[in-house]
Image: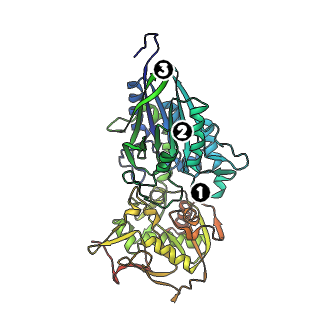
Amino acid sequence: MLEPNGEISDFTLTILYTTDVHGNVLPHHYANNEPSPTGFARLAPLIRAERARHEHTLLLDNGDLIQGTPFTYYYSRFASDAPHPMIRVLNELGYEGAVIGNHEFNYGMDLLNKAVRESNFPWMAANIVGAESGEPYFGKPYLIKEYPGGVRVGVLGLTTQYIPNWEHPRNVTGLAFKDACETAKRWVKHLREEERADLVVVAYHGGFERSLETGELTENETGENQGYRICMEVPGIDILLTGHQHREIDGAYINGVRIIQAGGMGMHLGMAQATLARENGAWRVTGTDSKLLHQGEYVPDPAVVEIVSETEEGTQGWLDQPIGFVEGDMTIVDPMKARLTEHPYIEFLNRVQMEAAEADISCTSLFDNWSPGFGSRITMREIVANYIYPNTLKVLRVSGQDIKDALERSATYFEYEDGAAKVSASFSDPKPQHYNYDMWEGIDYELDIARPHGDRVVKLEKDGKPIDPAGEYDVAMNNYRAVGGGEYPMFKDKPVVRDITVDVSELLANYIMEKGTIQASVNRNWKVTANGVEVVTE
């Protein structure tokens, strides 16, 4: 609409954003190449259509872009001299800004810095600063866009500050991670007062630590997710784009701030809209909206497919390399059963960790409910389909009490109701956290899940003798768990006896290639019971 003097009197901005795409481009599962409703190739036509449909748009990515599939793993290990295919896709689609996610650091700073340099758009993370300079490491912490009528839009980028609790120290050397909420207070004020932003958007690679309905805490206050606190404590925000938790949230407000979270894996395109009106020569936000757009049945975008074709061909060839065989059955048919009763695949993981780390105790987890285990013939495809994270190993020196406390934490994974075991809500809501339930080798233990939380470890022995709470034990575990990740504070800051910097997936592959054939076996060193009776599934 035009005013009598010819100036526009109202304005609508459509913000389109992706989050937690995790290296998904082509719509298939790498474990079996079966179709999957994920990835940029099918999301791209939707992005192009929405940008064409709306007069004024802003296209952003909210982090966790360059890690998460065998495709990105293959690129990082074997093809990183070439331009980054994920960045090439975003450049092709005309992205105007991106936020650093926690998984951006997984392959090291060299690869991340290369990705940033190759981008035709700025990367933002206001609270990730140089340890010495104290200034935002990735350049300007925000983006300013000016639209017709002089409408000024400010986008502030923030990243979950909990990264040092997960990431290998060598991947974050020279960086400091500031409190996201406190950082937002500083920079939102700056956007309003110094940059004269009429609309302020915060793009936060983090989620919500409280219930959106009641405001009650839904997780420990670690600072990993501060979306609720940011809405409540930081004045001047119109729209908060979130991620990290892989939730699907739209049509909601917190304290007058429009919020949205667009799932993950490229299944959805998030859309937030703001309308502004000119009043007394100044622009004022008059309304906001948000919705999630599913990629639907779009045909994969030819330009995107072409961009990734060479890396994809290399990935597929690498995945199909046969490396060994299994004698016996190591397939996973029922993931719940594999967590209630010792499974040959889990025992194999622990055995490899113990040998590689020269430790006689180990813990590991079944990361998700899609891990297939190993068939009779093992290829790299099976390795990466099961071990989906670029973890390394550490050996920590811990006390017997630490081991018991860790088992009690793992035991909270289960609830026991009406004679059956089920996954606790704290491990499934707001996102699945199966990777935070550990199973151990090198000790003998029993968890009675009919007992109260904190009192479920009813047996804990090593070599036939009770574990000494004050005794010292060396335990092999992945680097995520070794820094206390997954709410295991008993491991945080414990002495590191040994640091194995080779990826666990590579350790598994090397072990299998050396042995040729591995045996599917279990030694029944642990069990889950209810009132003393072993819990089983149908």
Task: Please report whichever mark, 3 or 1, sits nearer to the chain's N-terminal start.
Answer: 1
Task: Please report whichever mark, 2 or 1, sits nearer to the chain's N-terminal start.
Answer: 2
Determine which residue is flagged by label 3.
280
Q: Amino acid at mark 2?
A: Ala
Q: Amino acid at mark 1?
A: Glu
Looking at the image, residue 381 sits to the left or right of residue 499; the answer is left
Relative height, residue 463 to residue 58 (above, below): below
Looking at the image, residue 272 sits to the left or right of residue 405; the answer is left
Kind of element beneath mark 2: strand
Going 40% across and 55% down the picture, which residue do you hit? 430
Looking at the image, residue 419 sits to the left or right of residue 195; the answer is left
Task: Please report whichever mark, 2 or 3, sits nearer to the chain's N-terminal start.
Answer: 2
Kind of element beneath mark 3: loop
- Residue 339 placed where, x, y %? 39, 70
- Residue 392 placed where, x, y %? 58, 62
Using the rendered image of the protein, determine whether residue 144 is visible from the camera's viewpoint.
yes
Q: Residue furthest front?
A: 280
Q: Closer to the camera, 209 or 137?
A: 209
Determine which residue is flagged by label 2.
98
Q: Amino acid at mark 3?
A: Asn
Using the rendered image of the protein, determine whether residue 314 is visible from the camera's viewpoint.
no
Determine which residue is flagged by label 1.
167
Crowding at dot 2, Cα within 10 Å, few <14 / some 14-19 / many 20+, comes out as: many
Which disc number belongs to residue 449? none
Choose top left, top right, bottom left or bottom right for residue 459.
Answer: bottom left
Question: Disc 3 or disc 1, which is closer to the eye?
Answer: 3
